[in-house]
Image (tube, helix red, strand yellow):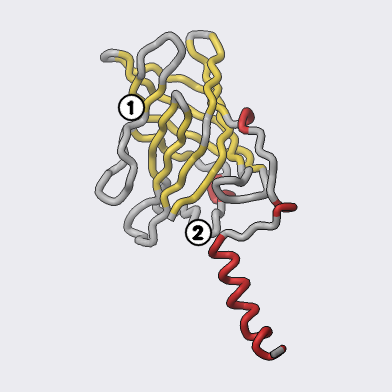
Amino acid sequence: MIRLQNKCMPLLFSFCLLAGCANPAEQVNVDKSKWFLSLKVHGQTVTLPLDVMYVHLTDNDAYPESFEIKGPAVNLVGEFPLTLRIDYMERWEKTLFKEIKILNRVRADYYWIEGPSTINLPGAPRRYISSGSFTVRKISGKMQGLNGDITLSGDIILNISVGDDIEKIIGTFSVHGVSLG
């Protein structure tokens, strides 16, 4: 009987990892108010809540991993450089101090990202983001996954379409990172 248990333990352990078993003592209380996008718009600070940054993983090295930064008034999409892979191990440290491009749209032929980059600033209609970038300056948190608290924080630049003009807006962000694969 003992021999059978010893052989089954690695299998049971693997199953628990795949099934997402978590020790309730390891669960974290998440303060979602710390996830935000703060922008300087016409001399005023505008702060918008953020929910999550989904990173869409790919096994094909010919395609970059993509991302969506989502909040009630924010949808930012883009791609990581081909050489930067968050991967299934959620290697967020690879993003530190690297400029990541925000795009108007990502190529829909290999991603499930449907919408363009947009923002709804208070008192203004929805605006399209023509381009931009963000740089992660800090990573905090202990637990990965949808219910985790991994937080990426840093600087952001958005180039917002306003009629025929482009308005450059600078700010900071803090968002929960989750990889999807």
Q: Amino acid at mark 2?
A: Tyr
Tell which of 106 and 75 is nearer to you: 75
* Secondary structure found at label 2: loop
Residue 5 is situated, as x and y percent measured from the top left of the image, at: 67, 84
First reached walking from the N terminus: tag 1 or tag 2: 2
Q: Quadrant of residue 175?
A: top right
Disc marking residue 42 = none
Q: Which residue is mark 1?
A: 130
91 or 28: nearer the viewer: 28
Do callouts 1 and 2 mark residues in contact (Cβ within 8 Å)? no
3D distance between C-alphas at marks 1 and 2: 30 Å
Crowding near pointer 1: few (<14 within 10 Å), some, many (20+)? some
* Screen quadrant of the C terminus: bottom left
Q: Is residue 5 above or below residue 44?
A: below
Q: Residue at x 69, y 45 (%)?
A: 28
Which residue type carries mark 1? Ser
* Residue 41 shown left or right of residue 116 in the figure: right
Across and down, in percent, residue 99 comes to 48, 39
- Left or right? Give the position of 152 relative to 60: right
Residue 96 percent location from the top left of the image:
57, 44
User: Which residue occupies 61% across, 40% down?
Assistant: 151
Percent of width and height locating residue 62? 32, 58
Q: Residue furthest front?
A: 1
Residue at horizontal 46 percent and vertical 20 percent from the top: 169
Q: Residue at x 39, y 46 (%)?
A: 66
Q: Nearer the viewer, residue 148 or 79?
A: 148
Q: Nearer the viewer, residue 75 or 86?
A: 75
Which secondary structure lies at badge 1?
Answer: strand
Judge depth for marks 1 and 2 and give the one in front: 2
Quadrant holding the N terminus: bottom right
Q: Is residue 30 above or below residue 130?
A: below
**Mark 2 — residue?**
88
